Image (cartoon, rainbow, N blue to C red):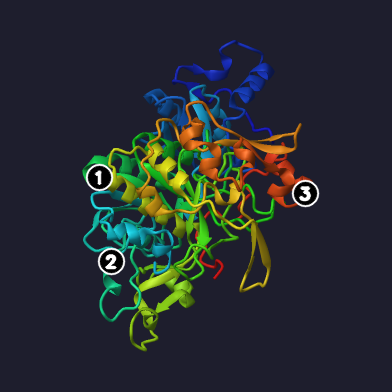
């Protein structure tokens, strides 16, 4: 780490005395003491920034900041932009040169930039057996789903009248009832589109979401180009927690993300989603679309994005429904990000769902529809006429962003059926009932480049299996412990990768939730915690990739060269 300039005189703890002079040490000793106090509190992507510049940063405290803490920040040139409600932290704008001084406050836990992030069903609905659920009256009635995304086009026929609240958290853009990017409307349609614009005797397909009568809350955090910040997402989740009782919000859908820069225990996005989870909200997050990324020599492993790397949330990978209503021919999308998570080795994703070439609601004249006109759905595709003009209501997108609302919709059906379920119980139910039958491997060919990608159906690729809505609704098991995702570690004595299940976990009950039951015998050897050897996991004996995941040669923040999310150029 490059040494930062340290100034003794500027930072005053609680505005009373120089933090680094409490022992009246010689100047050199004081300088060393200051540096040691600040060590580990600054995220690594704050290194080598121009000293004459300013930046927005998120400061996390060990407990709620006191007025003197905030005064001390302003005394070194910082501006307080926002105080967060559920994590003990603030969003500030501050000179880069003052970061090291600020970090010497012993009440400060961690400082990171306000990072940028991006957004990450004619065959899909029957593929996950949601159509059967609808026939029995399970449609999400009374369950609120907060869509934290690029907004929702409130006049779409499939969504109109069920968007009970909309707010924008995009700096400089207060338009809350629109979706200029087009991502959030598509996501909302997968969760709760009712198919109004494709229903009737003249229609071949009805594009209906998983929970077509769910209540929708639009919390816009992505601008017209699909870009957002950590702070905007944190503010939106704060609002979802605050509105939980008012609008019956039980689920937060996050089809967005960014690279991992530090442990989830320090990442402000991860800390915020944990607060939402503990407040009783099921948080469903996209795994990311970097499964083809071999920049770390890991063949796409350890590319799960933040906040999908948090062990509390339900992290979702993407399957291909192959354009049929049958599950038997479905294959894993090679672009779907794989675990274990960088730095913490959390077993992710938790579950997979259809995410490729999904038809859902279109926000007219949106950026995505303009950038990718070939993704338009011809009217003749779903009606009984020869009108080949692009539909004004539907559009195709691919990615884990599309798989995520499939699971959010499934969670809404479970909570309609059994409102008393906790987030941990919903997660455990969905994971246990997921289909475990997969091929050992498959090969996908990119239609544009012609490059072939091999997929191994292991624990870090498919998680607990393929979403099965009807199976989840017919299961009566209720867990009593935490459903945090387990941690993997490498045992150099055996050469195997093992899974560590924490005390109090729902996975400890071998009768109901045994490891082999939840994750399947295909990926767990003999029903024990021992998971296949490293050669099988990585497909090669690449020492470089191995060191990145399990060793000390961690590549900080470069696991995903693009920050997170929208993949509309997935496999057909």
Asked whether 187 or 349 is in front, the reply is: 349
Q: Earlier in the sequence, mark 2 or mark 3?
A: 2
Note whether residue 256 is visible: yes
Asked whether 409 or 264 is in front, the reply is: 409
Q: Residue at x 28, y 54 (%)?
A: 138
- Under circle 1, the secondary element is loop
Q: Earlier in the sequence, mark 1 or mark 2?
A: 2
Q: Residue at x 40, y 44 (%)?
A: 283
- Figure disc tally: 3
Determine whether, in the image, residue 304 is placed left or right of residue 241. right
Q: Earlier in the sequence, mark 3 or mark 1?
A: 1
Q: Is residue 182 above or below residue 117?
A: below
* Residue picked out by circle 1: 248
Residue 166 coordinates in the image, percent (x, y): 28, 54
Q: Quadrant of the C terminus?
A: bottom right
The 10 Å Cα crowd at callout 1, few under 14, some 14 to 19, many 20 or more, is: some
* Residue picked out by circle 2: 158
* Residue picked out by circle 3: 542
Residue lying farthest to the top in this orientation? 23
Q: Residue at x 52, y 33 (%)?
A: 265
Disc number for residue 197: none
The 10 Å Cα crowd at callout 2, few under 14, some 14 to 19, many 20 or more, is: many
Q: Residue at x 40, y 51 (%)?
A: 471
Residue 351 coordinates in the image, percent (x, y): 49, 49
- The Cα–Cα distance between marks 2 and 3, rounded to whole angstroms, is 49 Å
Asked if the residues shown at circle 2 and circle 3 are in contact, with their CB atoms under 8 angstroms apart, the answer is: no
Asked whether 461 or 20 is in front, the reply is: 461
Note whether residue 148 is visible: no
- The Cα–Cα distance between marks 3 and 1, rounded to whole angstroms, is 49 Å
- Under circle 3, the secondary element is loop
Residue 242 coordinates in the image, percent (x, y): 28, 39
């Amino acid at each position: 780490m490059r040494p930062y300039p340290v100034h003794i005189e500027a930072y005053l703890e609680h505005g009373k005395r120089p933090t680094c002079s409490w022992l009246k040490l010689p100047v050199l000793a004081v300088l060393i003491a200051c540096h040691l106090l600040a060590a580990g509190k600054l995220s690594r992507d704050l290194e080598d920034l121009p000293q004459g510049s300013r930046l927005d940063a998120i400061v996390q405290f060990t407990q709620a900041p006191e007025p003197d803490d905030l005064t001390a920040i302003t005394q070194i040139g910082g501006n307080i932009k926002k105080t967060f409600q559920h994590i003990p932290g603030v969003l500030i704008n501050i000179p880069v040169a003052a970061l090291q001084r600020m970090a010497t406050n012993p009440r400060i836990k961690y400082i990171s930039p306000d990072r940028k992030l991006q957004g990450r069903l004619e065959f899909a609905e029957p593929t996950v057996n949601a159509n059967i659920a609808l026939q029995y009256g399970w449609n999400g009635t009374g369950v609120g789903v907060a869509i934290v995304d690029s907004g929702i086009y409130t006049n779409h026929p499939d969504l109109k009248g069920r968007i009970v609240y909309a707010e924008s958290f995009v700096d400089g853009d207060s338009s809350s009832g629109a979706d200029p990017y087009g991502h959030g409307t598509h996501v909302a349609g997968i969760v709760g589109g009712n198919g109004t614009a494709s229903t009737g005797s003249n229609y071949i397909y009805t594009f209906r979401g998983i929970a077509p009568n769910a209540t929708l809350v639009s919390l816009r955090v992505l601008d017209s180009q699909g870009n957002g910040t950590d702070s905007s997402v944190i503010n939106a989740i704060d609002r979802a927690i605050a509105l939980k009782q008012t609008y019956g919000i039980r689920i937060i859908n996050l089809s967005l993300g960014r690279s991992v820069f530090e442990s989830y225990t320090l990442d402000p996005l991860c800390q915020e989603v944990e607060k939402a989870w503990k407040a009783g909200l099921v948080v469903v997050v996209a795994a990311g679309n970097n499964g083809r990324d071999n920049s770390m020599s890991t063949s796409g492993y350890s590319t799960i994005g933040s906040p999908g790397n948090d062990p509390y949330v339900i992290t979702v990978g993407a399957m291909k429904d192959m354009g049929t209503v049958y599950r038997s021919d479905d294959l894993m999308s090679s672009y779907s990000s794989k675990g274990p998570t960088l730095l913490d080795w959390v077993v992710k994703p938790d579950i997979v769902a259809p995410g490729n070439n999904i038809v859902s609601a279109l926000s007219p004249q949106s950026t995505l529809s303009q950038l990718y006109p070939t993704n338009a759905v011809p009217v003749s595709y779903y009606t009984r006429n020869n009108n080949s003009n692009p539909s004004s209501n539907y559009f195709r997108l691919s990615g884990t962003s599309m798989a995520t609302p499939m699971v959010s919709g499934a969670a809404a059906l479970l909570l309609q059926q059994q409102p008393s379920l906790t987030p941990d119980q919903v997660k455990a139910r969905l994971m246990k009932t997921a289909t475990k039958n997969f091929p050992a491997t498959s090969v996908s060919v990119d239609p544009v480049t012609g490059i072939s990608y091999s997929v191994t159906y292991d624990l870090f690729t498919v998680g607990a299996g393929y979403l099965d809505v009807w199976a989840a609704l017919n299961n009566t098991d209720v867990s009593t412990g935490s459903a945090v995702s387990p941690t993997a570690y490498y045992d150099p004595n055996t050469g195997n990768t093992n899974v560590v299940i924490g005390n109090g976990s729902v996975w400890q009950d071998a009768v109901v939730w045994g490891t082999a039951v939840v994750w399947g015998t295909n990926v767990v050897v003999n029903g024990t915690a021992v998971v296949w050897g490293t050669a099988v996991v990585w497909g090669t004996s690449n020492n470089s990739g191995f060191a990145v995941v399990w060793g000390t040669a961690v590549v900080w923040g470069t696991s995903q060269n693009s920050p997170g999310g929208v993949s509309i150029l997935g496999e057909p």
